[in-house]
Amino acid sequence: MRQSEFGFDHGDAAEAIVDGAFLLRGRALPVVDELLVGVQDVVEASPLRHMITPGGAPMAAAQSNCGALGWVADRRGYRYEACDPETGRPWPAMPQVFASLARDAAGECGYDGFDPDCCLLNRYEVGCGMGQHVDADEQDFAWPIVSVSLGLPMTFRFGGVERGGKTLPVVLQHGDVLVFGGAARRRYHGTSPLKRGVHPVLGACRVNLTLRRAGTGALPRD
Ligand code: MD6
Ligand code: FE
């Protein structure tokens, strides 16, 4: 452990990207097979779908959720809901390996006690990306979001707290874990379109898991 320039301890493996955001390269690889079984179980119960934004356009990424809450977009807006609107049933339970990886990775970056209640799954086909946005529908921004990348590499882009302007590109590879907390939590971010390729395990796509604390919970520090 060492003291980071941002004032708290994190493991030597954590690379500081911007204020409060850290990249743990390959951190998910030891449990990647279990993660992929979990993804399969989740999408069997709550299939991936292209949600419709309030503006009426389908999201480029196909999405699903697991955990007590799921992120939903529709004509009425963006929010978290306990039931999958497609199936009418609660979102599938969060596989234990998702929650424990997220908790451990967050802890290694100085965010102790992270207990996610939502995992949003995004699946991108070649040519698809995600526009610049801020994750703003969670109740408590003091918690980080932990993001796990699987499949083809994709360029993630960190922006600033205002829309537009320069972005910092970071390539996320299969097994990388991004811990997105602190001041970075209010930054715009998005991805470039997925480049053509074939991943040996997942084929011509990328799957991203973003683990969040969407509902209320104890404050992470003090
Ligand atoms: C993606 N990720 O990597 C999209 N948001 O496909 C996100 O939008 C994201 O990775 C908040 C925190 C971490 C993320
Ligand atoms: Fe996001």
Image (cartoon, rainbow, N blue to C red):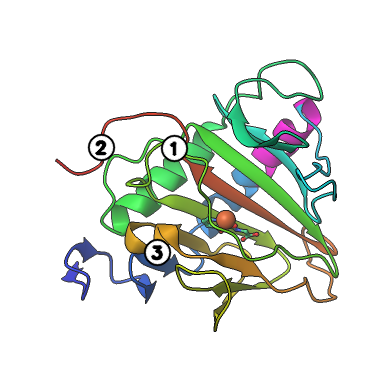
N-terminal label among 3 and 2: 3
**In this picture, is 34 found above or below 127?**
above
Observer-nearest of 159 and 122:
159
Inspect the image, locate mark 3, and give the three-letter code of the amino acid beneath it: Ala
Considering the numbered disc 1 on the image, is that residue within a helix, a strand or a loop? loop
Q: Which quadrant does ligand 2 occupy?
A: bottom right
Extreme residue toward the top, this view: 89
> Which quadrant holds the C terminus?
top left
Q: Residue 177 lies in magenta, yes or no? A: no
Q: What kind of residue is marked 2? A: Leu
Callout 1 touching callout 3 (CB < 8 Å): no
Mark 1, other Cα within 10 Å: few <14 / some 14–19 / many ≥20: many
Q: Residue at x 79, y 51 (%)?
A: 59
Residue highlighted by disc 1: 213
Mark 2, residue position: 219
In the depicted structure, whether residue 201 falls above or below residue 116: below
Vertical placement of residue 14 versus 91, above or below: below
The residue identified by callout 3 is 184
Q: Position of residue 131 (x, y in %)?
A: 69, 65
Which is the main secondary structure of the residues drawn in magenta?
A: helix
Which is nearer the N-term, disc 2 or disc 1?
1
Eye-nearest disc, 1 or 3 = 3
What residue range appears in magenta?
Answer: 36-45
Q: Are marks 2 and 1 in contact (CB under 8 Å)?
A: no
What is the C-alpha distance between the residues marked 1 and 3?
Answer: 16 Å
Please tell me whether mark 3 sits on a helix, a strand or a loop: helix
Q: Is residue 98 left or right of residue 154?
A: left
